[in-house]
Image (cartoon, rainbow, N blue to C red):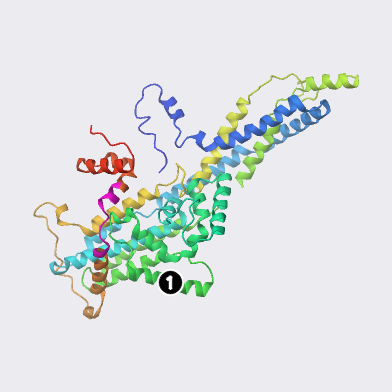
Amino acid sequence: MTVSYSETISSSQGGVFIKILLLWRGSLYKLVYTDLFFYLVIYYAFNISYRCFMSPQTRQSFELVVKLCNEMDKSIPLSFILGFFVAGVIGRWWQMYLNIPWLNRISFLSYGILTGTRENFEQARRLRLSMMRYLNIGWILLMHSISEKVMHQFSDIKPPDETEEGNSAGEGLLTRIRYVMDRLAGTNQMAAQLHANSKSRSQKGIRYLLESINRCTRVRLHFPKLVTETEIQAFERAESEYVSKYWRPYVPDYWLPLQWAVLLCKKAMVHGFCDPRSMVKLMEEIEDVRGMMQTLVIYNEVVIIAVYSYFLLQLFSQQFVNPKWTAEALGRLTNTSVLPISTGSEHHHGEVIDMYFPVFTVFQFLFLMGWLKVAMCVMNPFGDDDEDFHTLEMLDYNLEISSRCSEAPPSQFPEGLSEASMEWIRRSPGSEADSLFDYLASAESEFRQAGEPSQEERLHEILAKPATAAAAPRRLLPPLRQLRQRRGQPGCRRR
């Protein structure tokens, strides 16, 4: 999920190491350049003041501070503390990656189990489709609460200078102020926009979020509609009950669609789409998905203070000071002999090498601060950094694999390899009174009304993914040119 350099180091030719060092995306320089810039600004502010503006008495006091800080920074076991911290964070990052729910296993399992007989193949397809919809809804709701990319994708965030219709000028001003303050504090653009619009998003309720999911082109490429009107109403009832009972803002329950999927498993057994053992197997798979989701929600938050305190001492301990020069200036003022302050070992008597640029201090800053920055990046792997998980690509994969497995059109299979009819599975008594088929039929009618995304929407989504656009089939190239010309982009060339 991090930045891959495999293409750069695929050859053993010379210069590979230089190529890696010159890469910007995911590099150490990108992580620490802001901190290093401010560190050097403060460093040279003290350095120039010492050289040009301080009196001899003040320079001598400054040299004493440098000597004290030089002794103190050696007492901080920073490498040990930072190494222990990074090892723990990386281990947690790897466990979170292993617990990201992938829907390929349960998609193939549902296709293999929920088949039915020749008379109800269509009903089995609708059943599989609804079950995959529920799993994808739960996945999106979970990621919406922890991933900045997914939250931004389904929040319809507008730029801070655009005030939404119905909002007062004061609310728009507060939104812009929050955005500017977050950007000045070093927050990236996506996180700043999300925080600035957090109040307006929380006031719109669960319906706004679910309708945003239905409007998303990423979703409509695979499912005509992910959440039906009756399901949105069920979420609204859950929201109303939660707010009236707990008097807190409602966070969408990611496990609620999984509960609906479990209910579909029971109804599938009642209507003869699977036997009891297969029903239990499907429920176990859904429980595994729910368990992985629950693991991702658990998030733990000392070492940062130690690192910044260490470099605060380094600002003084690594300063250039010339005690011999200061002692001579004081001697001229007082007409006495003044011994220079020893800032190093006992045999050091004020001789120093004038380093106009702190080379080794910068190297130390790059190594230690870079180590900390990497740990801070992977501490929350669901953000918008280069090293974070690509949650939108995971979403695309889950949507695609679940929709294709649930639909399973005959065109995907070789001629003569047709669907098997499970005649031996019997319906349970009283299944005729169940309303499963009516529920699936109403959902199917909503899908037909929603329709598929237009060709322009599809091409816009393709253009938003450079890798997909490069691999687009040739029959899409003329429409791609037309759409690029409308958007003012250069046309693509045939190879």
Residue 104, visible in the rendered structure: no
For the question of whether residue 27 can be seen, the reply is yes
Whether 7 is drawn above or below 404: the answer is above
Nearer to us in this view, 9 or 239: 239
- Residue 87's spot in the image, x, y percent? 52, 43
User: Which residue is rendered at x = 54% and y = 46% of the image?
Assistant: 187
The quadrant where residue 334 appears: top right
Considering only vertical position in the picture, is 177 above or below 20? below
Q: Is residue 339 left or right of residue 17?
A: right
- x, y percentage for residue 134? 33, 63
Residue 283 in the image: above or below residue 462? below
Where is the N terminus found, in terms of image quarters? top left
Q: Residue at x 57, y 51 (%)?
A: 177
Magenta region:
448-459
Q: Position of residue 41 (x, y in %)?
A: 64, 32
Of residues 494 and 76, the one drawn nearer to the viewer in this rendering: 494
Looking at the picture, which amino acid does disc 1 mark?
Answer: Ala
Q: Which residue is mark 1?
A: 238
The picture places residue 490, in percent across and down from the top left corner, at 31, 36
Residue that protrudes farthest toward the left in the picture: 416
* Residue 425 located within the stretch drawn in magenta: no
Q: Residue at x 33, y 69 (%)?
A: 229
Give residue 25's quadrant in the image: top left
Label 1 secondary element: helix
- Extreme residue in the right direction: 335
**Mainly helix, strand or loop, the magenta region?**
helix
Crowding at dot 1, Cα within 10 Å, few <14 / some 14-19 / many 20+, comes out as some
Q: Quadrant of residue 439?
A: bottom left
Q: Is residue 357 above or below residue 156?
A: above
Relative horizontal placement of residue 5, taking residue 416 as reference (left or right):
right
115 left or right of 60? left
